[in-house]
Amino acid sequence: MQKVTRRKFVQTSAVAAGGTYAASKFLFGPLETMAVADELAQAGPVEDFIATTCWIGKQDCGMIARRIDGRVIKFEGNPTNPRNVGTLCPKGHAQIVSLYDPNRVKWPLIRTNAKGESGEVRRATWDEAIQLVASTVNEVRERNPKLVLWQKGRSKAKKFYDDAFVKSIGSNKLGHGAYCSDAGYRALEYTIGTHAVLHPDFRFCNYMLSWGWNITNAGGNKTCWITWPRHMVKARERGMKIAHIDPRLRSAGPFADTWLPIRPGTDLALALALCHELIALGHLDVPYLTRYTNGAFLVKGDGTVAKITVGEGDEATDVGLVWDEDTGTAMPLDEARSPVLEGEFQVDGDAVKTSFSLFREHVAANTPEWAADITGLTAAQIREMASDFGENAMIGSTLVVDGVEVPYRPVGIMAYHMAQQELGFQTARAMTMVSMLVGAVGAAGGQLSDYDWKIYKNYAKFEKFTVEDPPYDYLLNNSKYFPINTGLPGMVARVMNDPDRYGVEELPEVAILHMVNPLASFASQPEFIESYKKFKFVAVISPWLSETADYFADVVLPAATIEKFEGPIDASDQYSTATTLRVPPMEPLFESKGEIDIYLDLCEAMGTLYGEGGYLEWVNKGLGLVGDNESFAIPTDTKPEVRDIFGIGPSPRGSTLHSSRIRSMESSTRGRASRQRCTAM
Ligand code: SF4
């Protein structure tokens, strides 16, 4: 099997891109310098600044682009952005290298040799390349739109622009997959309803379990390695204690009070032992567990919750029963004056136990000694950690925040990628249980997750998921393999290589790859090479000729780097709400285009741009330009310029950013929901 190495790729792509190389020398070489120098000598340089948003990283830090004569010469942090307040990480500063990278794809390319070997390409016009992609995709869509697979590595424009494209053409969508934080997200959605992982309320937290978190050099969970460490350092100065649970001390040394060098991949055992010990020590927020979790729900012998139907007709819904001590009967939680958290009862002749009683039984064997054997920590260390966590939780206390008295539980866990291990889903759930037992979820100083406590759609969906019989689609949706999560690229590659094994009958024929490089990014390369040979057509949208593009792209559409409009983008540091935009600090270099431009062109050519169900209608929905905001909507019968979508005037200088449409977008993203304490064990 042919193996693609980066060295080989660089050698071969340099040869294949000979014409491109020559053009880049012309653009950045002595000729241009001399021409510009000549002009400057006469007029003098003009310096100006453009406010924009970092493009190279995940967290969208606010940036100021310093320009001389219209060309960016430096990126600096934007001091008005609450997330990064005037700072940038080294990668943010260094993205100027990406902007001026001479190896960028400079114009559309069409393959001239067979797929599966290093690419030979020719320069094409945008019109030719777009028409080729559109006609090929449409031919497949007419038979079955799901035979088109769209995949992206990291969405920067905002996910709804991607969704708008995928929905308008009816294709399947694949992201960068479950090996990232997906299992953590699903765990929290399933357990407390939020679409995020775990972090504490740094403002008031007094004791934090820093669990697998690179304390000064890592971000995740919606904010970055600038913002979280800033919160953490402030909390340290206030006196917050940190127990650092990590096989390596890393940079936590000066910031951690305790280092617990856990054996890799054993975090689930530690979390279960902490649950065991918190229960054993009585560190339980009984009113919270009874009223705000399903801990009091009665569970039948078959493992299902005892329920009753309330309401009639379309209003009818099944609700769980709890045991009411006052009346000695089972009833819905809302009606019970004295619901009990623990016990065994009889309901309609069935023996039932509360969910919390079952949980206590479940963790009864997960003693500190049991976990010590697995984790490499000592039982005494685990006991001390549980005791510190429970005592610092100050169960029963309240705090007045902004004039409102709220529960105060100043303990929490910082963990993001801890779900990237075998049983990672259950690990993140067990960690969340640790915080739930002491009532810290959503409390001041306690366990936070998403910023706004909006209950994500999966919370209800996971209650009703079904496992279907084969044949499955090639993403294995609702299959016995992945009943609640799917979309792992490596799994799709396996399915494509052996569809019978997974009960799959139809495989994708066309791939549209947007800023993703499966051959180099995902395990394992041989399987990806084999699976990509099965695609009849591959279109790549990227600023660079990746390994995957080199070996498999039929067409490469050159995407811009930071030189484009994107957004609106959340700039919150979780304590302040803000919205920002990515504004092109200069015109796109070479013949590259912003992704929204490319999708407008593709949809126009495919006939999926206008009208009901078209790309523009989906973009309007994504921007919230519906209902009361409909008067700000983009017309769905005319192809807009991308700057029209943002309601921005003709200058890319950002001075007219606050148009009515932008204000409307902002208002639709404000009004964050008040915190809900809605959790499930
Ligand atoms: S942390 Fe901020 S500045 Fe650094 S790469 Fe990420 S978004 Fe850009």
Image (cartoon, grey):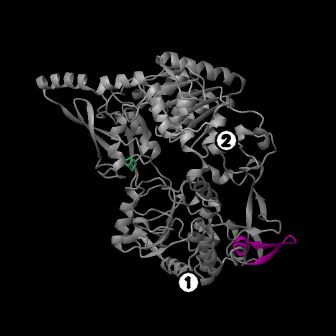
Q: Is residue 452 above or below residue 305?
A: above
Question: Outermost residue toward the right?
Answer: 349
Query: In the image, what residue occupies the spot 63% across and 39% down?
Result: 528
Which residue is denoted by mark 2 in the rendering?
492
Q: Position of residue 98 (x, y in %)?
A: 37, 37
Looking at the picture, how far across and down is residue 624, in whole percent?
50, 38
The quadrant in which residue 145 appears is top right
Q: Secondary structure at mark 1?
A: helix
Instruction: Please give the label number shown on residue 455.
Output: none
Give the position of the N terminus as an image quadrant: top right
Secondary structure of the residue carrying numbered label 2: helix
In depth, the one of 463 and 338 nearer the eye is: 463
What residue sits right under mark 1 in the picture?
380
Whether 603 is drawn above or below 187: the answer is: above
Decide if residue 561 is in sight here: yes
Q: How many marks?
A: 2
The region drawn magenta spans 343-359
Residue 200 versus residue 170 in the image, above or below: below
Decide: is 535 above or below 88.
above
Q: Please tell me which residue lies in front, 399 or 5.
A: 5
Q: Is residue 527 left or right of residue 641?
A: right
Residue 340 in sight: no
The residue located at (40%, 73%) in the rendering is 240
Q: Earlier in the sequence, mark 1 or mark 2?
A: 1
Q: Residues within 10 Å of mark 2 (few under 14, many from 20)?
A: many
- Residue 467 in the figure: left or right of residue 258: right
Residue pictured at 75% horizontal, 33% vertical: 506
Tell me residue 459's x, y (percent): 64, 54
Amino acid type indicated by mark 1: Ala
Q: Position of residue 24 (x, y in %)?
A: 34, 26
